[in-house]
Every structure is written in C-alpha cells, then in structure tokens.
Amino acid sequence: MQGLIEAAADILIESRSTVALTGAGISVESGIPDFRSAGGLWSRYNPAEYADIGAFRANPEKVWQMLTEMDAIVGQARPNPAHLALGELEDIGLLTCVITQNIDNLHQAGGSKNVIEYHGNSSTLSCLWCGKRFTAAEKRGEIPPRCVCGKILKPDVVFFGEAIPEEALHRSYDFASSAQALLIIGTSALVSPANTIPALAKRSGAKLVEVNKERTHLTDSLTDVFLQGNAGEIMPRIVETVRKKREGITSF
Ligand code: NAD
C-alpha cells in the first residue's frame, strides 16, 4: 500500500490542477450511510423509491419520513479525516476544487472552500408549486415543512429525475476538463451524469487516483492508481506523504 500512496502523492505534487470528485462513501465514516452498503437508512427506504422526484410529487408526506431521518443523521455528522485531508490539500495549494455528490455540507465543515455541490444542498427548501424559497433553519421542527401557499416544501437537493443545477454542471465541466489529476473518493460512479466526470478528465489528460473500499467499474478501465480501503485512513496518509516529499524537495 505505501508504494501506491507514494504514487498518488507524486501525481498530486506534479499536477498543476487537481480536482476531487466525492460520493457518499467519503461520509460513511462520519456516520452517514451510503446507498450501497447493507443496513441502515437505505435498507428501509429504497432510494429509487424515496429519492425520486416523481415519488416526491406523488406523495411528499411519505418522502419526508425519510428526509426527516436523513436530516437527523446529517445534523449530527462531523467531518472525518478524509474531509479534513481535502481541506488541507486545498490549503497547501494542491487541490483546486471539490466536486461533491453529497448534500451533507461536510466538505465545507472540513475546511474546503471551493466546493461544487453537484446534487445541491439541503440547507434551503423550495416550493415546487409557487417557487418560494425558505432556509431549512426557519422551517426546523415543522414536519413536513409547508410553504405559505400550503404545499409541502422540497429540499434543494437533486432527486433522481431532476436536472443538475446549471452552474454546478458548467463549473464541474470546466474544472474536470482542465484538471491534470482527479481524485475520486467514495463513489460507485453509477449515478449519472456525475459519473461522466472521470472519463471527461481522463480524455483531457488527467491522471486518476481512486480511493474506495471496493473496486468499481472505473478501477480497471480508467483509474491509474487504486487505493483500496477507508477514505478516512487513506487520505491522511496521502497528505502526510505529500508533505514529507515536498519537505524533501525543498531541503535539497
Ligand atoms: P454510492 O452509495 O453509490 O457508493 C458509495 C461508494 O463508496 C461505494 O463504492 C462504496 O464502496 C464506497 N465506500 C463506502 N464506504 C467507504 C469508505 N469508508 N471509504 C471509501 N469508500 C467507501 O454513493 P455515490 O456514488 O455517491 O452515489 C449515491 C448518491 O447518493 C449520490 O448522488 C449522493 O448524492 C447521494 N447520497 C449522499 C449522501 C451524503 O450526502 N452523505 C449519502 C447517501 C447518498
């Protein structure tokens, strides 16, 4: 493993523009379950059923049962060493931005400043009928939260069947297509269109470093360096190796 960590660190040091693409797996060690692992929230609420815009429109009360549980879990979660490691990489000038599929705000809490929230954010709620918007804080305790028009509000996260926010889509495209390295952390890369980002970066000449507990369909097709294990253990090791290598370079 140390050899692979060194290879990943070399890629980051040599790259002039590195982007991280993260998925639910990076937040698992913060206590937020991903879609794929057995047990927890998603064994009771099938995401295809509960995270779908058609399901929300048809029965928002039912979907809010899941959203209320998810909010409670996310509200207690704190950034883990993988989030902190990305914040540190940005601080030392080795990470341009994080493109995250997560809606849990843990990258920002972990010190990342340039974060593209590809699937939106749960801190605001909108009315699908009249368009009015509220902060989640002003509706806290109201279950399900309602608009002044009486309809049930939807969090501003992207449900299956909804479009990606245009600005996030364009910024991600620009960063990924000009990146020299892409760090892919804790994503199964099954959810579209976020899963087109690795191929886009690769076509543009980026080296791909993948950190995941399990192999994915990217591992044997696009990935240059695959680090298998928990992101919360691997990411701090990469940052530590980067630091040591840079100290070594500057001490010559
Ligand atoms: P996913 O559930 O499809 O896949 C998670 C991946 O992370 C898997 O490949 C798994 O092997 C890996 N993983 C699990 N624990 C890990 C760990 N400790 N270290 C490294 N890797 C680990 O997640 P996805 O690809 O992000 O797609 C699911 C969708 O669900 C996304 O759109 C995301 O927005 C949403 N989601 C978000 C959250 C969140 O905000 N935290 C949580 C659940 C789902």
Image (cartoon, rainbow, N blue to C red):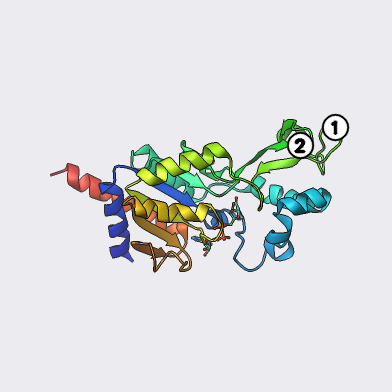
Count of numbered circles in the view: 2
Q: How far across and how far down the image is residue 210, in percent?
A: 41, 59
The reply, left or right, for residue 99 in relation to residue 201 is: right
Q: How far across and how far down the image is residue 79, in percent?
A: 53, 47
Q: How far across and how far down the image is residue 95, in percent?
A: 37, 43
Quarter occupied by residue 117: top right
| Amino acid type at mark 2 | Cys
Q: Is mark 2 within 8 Å of ligand 1?
A: no
Taking the view exactly as shown, the residue that stands out farthest to the right is 150
Q: How far across and how far down the image is residue 72, in percent?
A: 71, 48
Q: Which residue is mark 2?
A: 127
* Nearer to us in this view, 242 or 154: 154
| Figure check: 10 above or below 218 | above
Q: CA distance from mark 2 to mark 1?
A: 9 Å
Q: Confirm whether residue 66 shows in the render.
A: no
| Amino acid type at mark 1 | Cys
Q: Which mark is residue 52?
A: none
* Nearer to us in this view, 19 or 65: 19
Quarter occupied by residue 123: top right
Q: Which residue is mark 1?
A: 149
| Figure check: 24 above or below 154 | below
